[in-house]
Image: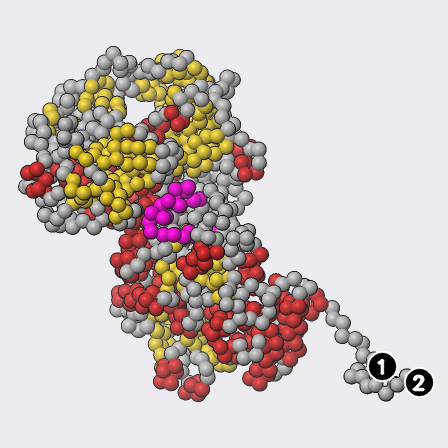
Amino acid sequence: MTPNCNHTSSYPELNYGSGAKWIKNLTQGRLSNFLGGHFSDVNLSSKLFVHRLDGPGVVDLQVWSAPGLTKPLFAEAIRKKFRSAKKGESFGPSWTNHWWKVKMTIPASWKDYERVQLEFDPGCEAMVFSTDGVPLQGITGGFGGDRRVEHIIPREAVLRGTYEVVIESSCNGMFGVPWNGDAVAPPDMNRYFGLASADLVVPNQEAWRLMWDFNTLRELVDTLPGNTPLQNKALVTANAIMNAFTTGDDENINQMRAIAEDVFGKGWEAKGAGIYDEGAKRAQVVGISYCHIDTAWLWPYAVTQQKTARSWSTQINLMERFPEHRFACSQAQQFKWLEQQYPPLFEKLKHKIVSGQFHLIGGAWVENDGNMPSGEALVRQFLYGQRYFESRFGKRCETAWLPDTFGLTAAYPQLIRDAGMKYFFTQKLSWYLPLADTYTAQANVGEVKKAISNHKNLESNDTALLVFGNGDGGGGALPKMLENLRRIRAVTNNHRELPPVSMGSTVEQFFEDIERDSKGGTSLPVWGTYTSHGSIKKGNRKCEILLRDVERVATLATIYKPASSNYVYPKKSIDDCWEKVLLNQCAGMVYDDAERLYSEVRRDCQKMLDVAFGVLLRASSTACGESRFAEKPTGFLALNLTPFPRQEVVEVPLSGDGVLPSFPTVVQTSLDGKRGYALIECDGNGLCGREMSMRDECLPVCVEAVSSNNFILKTSVIKMTVREGRITSIYDLVLKRELIEEGKTGGLVIFEDRPNYWDAWDVEVHHLETRTPLAFSSFRVVAQGPLRATVEARVKYGQSDIKVMFDAEVDWHERHKFLKFELPLNINNTVATYECQFGHVQRPTYKNTTLDAAKFEVCGHKFADFSEFGYGVAILSESKYGFACEGNVLRISLLRAATAPDADQDQGLHEFSWAVMPHVGSFLESDVPRAACIFNSPLHVRAIPRGVASVEPLVREFPFSLHGARNVFLETIKRGEDDDFESPTAKKTVVLRLYEAFGGHGRIELRIARNVHVLAAYTTNLLEDTKAEVELSRDVQGDGASTLALEFRGFEVKTVKLVLADAEEGRTRNFKSDPDPVPIGR
């Protein structure tokens, strides 16, 4: 049969065309020509604005420039005399502030347009205010990715035809004023910024929306694999849009936007924020807007205050335009600045917190450094932060937030939980979290995709947090970011090649989802800059210890003060000092500001100590300083504010003749006759020290000068030998053991210090390859014994003069050098031990792996220890935080000399101390933590003025003492946060903070002196919320002390609150008679 050939076909039998095969890479390459670039005058960029007007009569400008570097607030600035100004003028120099009055006249015909806006570009940062002083939004001038120069004019003003605003411009960029735009370069202090635009414009909103459509399509094309349907569809669609571009009029733009719906879905835009309600019920990527503002980095604190107001006002403005927008914000200090300086904005912020759009996170005073602050300082970060949030907003934070902190202490998990928070967010765990690898995401397709593709624990939970918004220098989310996320969600509602992203959730909801999926966290894995600017590190350590001492003495003064005394615990002054110290612990630094604040803290703490000691000693006294007394004092008292027994040599200034008959136990006088030395002994928990004469067990120390650069220092237990300017021997006379490795020497060493980029931040491992030992070139005997023997050793290096007696004085003028002290020890171990907050960490001394090698510089607090079975050596530090142990060489880092961002970092005079402590037994058998505490806590030597025959201290011992396990320390004694300090009859509470220091269990008995009547005792969290009542017992057959038992696990921190009787009740029930007088000088 003949086949039937009458069938029909939809395509021709003959093909006369060339075929539809494309060259994909060329098509993809052309996409860059649709916006900007060489064709900007004929592509979409040429259609973004409909009208633009400027100049007098349209935009009238007046300006007032604040004098110098002052930062007047709105109320002051608005009263000043303004002058006429015009576009194109330049303003400066760096860090100066300029205020503008901007009056606009809007053409009547513009009322028909969707939007009219002011484009104000001063080339720097600025803030727009209403005429009555309400901050409206921030401005970021220039043409970087953080550009934000548009201010939308309210509809009612457009209809009215006139509009006025006030603008404060500040002569700095988002990252300060660095030379040549390099963020870590020193600041250019003479930079000027030009007013590039002050224009009234009508944007073509549909053209802008098309631009955002096209940008999202390009991101899809550039991010997704080339063999996926969505990537090809996005490329086809973007190419079709370019082919459809003709006149660029409204009809043409609408046509191109309709083409984009092939990827985004029909009618997607009309749904607005409702786009997130469609598609996947559970999003894998949760978007949270955030604006990281370094409280200090490349700008002073005053600029941070401005950045805060600019950034947060902008985000509040965006919340009105994007209902799904949720903004997370940390750092109580920045909220307090806003409250003090911008109260109208603070009120708007409070409303947004109530509405659930502005989220409180962090729970800390600042986003602080995680390694340098003491354990108690970390407690106060959370205590002051959480109490501020609760007092202002009625809520505490549930998530600790340290995205940009360089180093995280092992103490954080328990401290965060004990501060009332369940979750923790950071980006600095091996630069791994968040999964998009940044806390300043730009909300693009690549970051959304990476949030899941970079996820290392999909077996436990498959969600990720996208933290987006410009940061470090502030700014936060831009409208284009929120527009892009809507489009990405629209794409994922129709395609499955990207993880769906959601908006509108809180950070806590994200973590709750992880907690739920991971069975309460049980299926999750467990993961277990400190020499630059030495004066800052010293200021931090000294002020932390000063505040500890102030709180101890002030607490005792309120407990024991006589009925006639009107002394009040100085809570506000203590709080002010703590807030300054906590502010300076931010993960960055403003050196001049920090030095000023530390100086204020030292001054105020000394005043508080003087007043409190006056109450306790029943006599006025002054601290013994380095200067001579104008008149001879009657005598002195040495007061021990640590809970540890100690024998110590104290130094007191002598009068002009070098003799003080009223100081009968000054055993030794300095060679210049200006200082006397006495031997003081303090019992455990003893407050007042006793002067001692030289006894048989107090063998004298001596120095023996062998030659001009050889000498021997000798005590009853240790002999140190220096030859040719280097330490050749440290010999234990009791155990007859040499501590220095044979053939090696110890002493100062210097290294080349040239990091790959982050000059003041990074120390690179290759600096260890450039070691140069320094030999002392001259020696001078300063003290010969019997209490103190001292040799002053000097070395000249480059332009620097180094004078060392273990109390070092260094006139430092190097660049890119690193000064250290090292000892090659006759000890062998695979780990060394370094103090951290409320405990210690151990780090390897070898380099078997890259992880081992990366631990060549370790942050330690008051000590680093290198021990083996039976023996060890520790280096104690009173202000340095950098240590290392390489093989058997134990080092302490003393000074660096970076030149960026501070060109003169550490140049000039430095004074600091360190000590070498040999000890019997391994670290866990030693008293190194106790010795380090004592080394950092010199006795308070008080001079008693003439005419005072005796001193009658109200208390000779601390009323709180620990008995039992030696591994538990009493760190803090303070008054309760919620006490009524003004009422003489109010119940007093005393808060004690204790911790286990060695990493083991321990049981202690806390004894409370019988003259302190305790009504009740409680364990609390760090915020002083009650956890449980603790049973009290009284030693009726002994000294009548109250006792309570406490058990500790390794490194555990406990807080105990004691409720005391009121003053009258305590006096009638428990107080002993007044103590016997203490003779002056005895």
Which residue is identified by label 1?
14
Q: Mark 1, residues whose alpha carbon is within 10 Å: few (<14), some, or many (≥20)? A: few
Q: In this view, does 543 lie above or below 345?
A: above
Q: Where is residue 1059 in the image (x, y as percent from the top left)?
A: 18, 44
Q: How many labels does the image show?
A: 2
Q: Is residue 37 visible?
A: no
Residue in the foreground of this view, choosing between 306 and 991: 991
Q: Position of residue 508 (x, y in %)?
A: 41, 58
Q: In this view, does 1060 lie to the left or right of 903?
A: left
Q: Residue at x 38, y 22 (%)?
A: 919
Q: Give the range drawn in magenta.
A: 407-427
Residue in the foreground of this view, choosing between 8 and 1029: 1029
Q: Residue at x 71, y 67 (%)?
A: 24
For the C terminus, the image quarter is top left
Q: Residue at x 64, y 67 (%)?
A: 231
| Mark 2 vs mark 1, CA separation in Å | 24 Å
Q: Which residue is drawn at 26% across and 25% down?
A: 646
Q: Position of residue 246 (x, y in %)?
A: 63, 82
Q: In this view, does 756 lie to the left or right of 909?
A: right
**Mark 2: amino acid:** Thr
**Mark 1: amino acid:** Leu
Which residue is identified by label 2?
2
Between circles 2 and 1, the one closer to the viewer is: 2
Q: Is residue 428 above or below residue 827?
A: below
**Magenta-colored stretch includes residue 903:** no
Q: Which of marks 2 and 1 is nearer the N terminus?
A: 2
Q: Mark 2, residues whose alpha carbon is within 10 Å: few (<14), some, or many (≥20)? A: few
For the N terminus, the image quarter is bottom right
Q: Where is residue 1023 in the image (x, y as percent from the top left)?
A: 28, 49
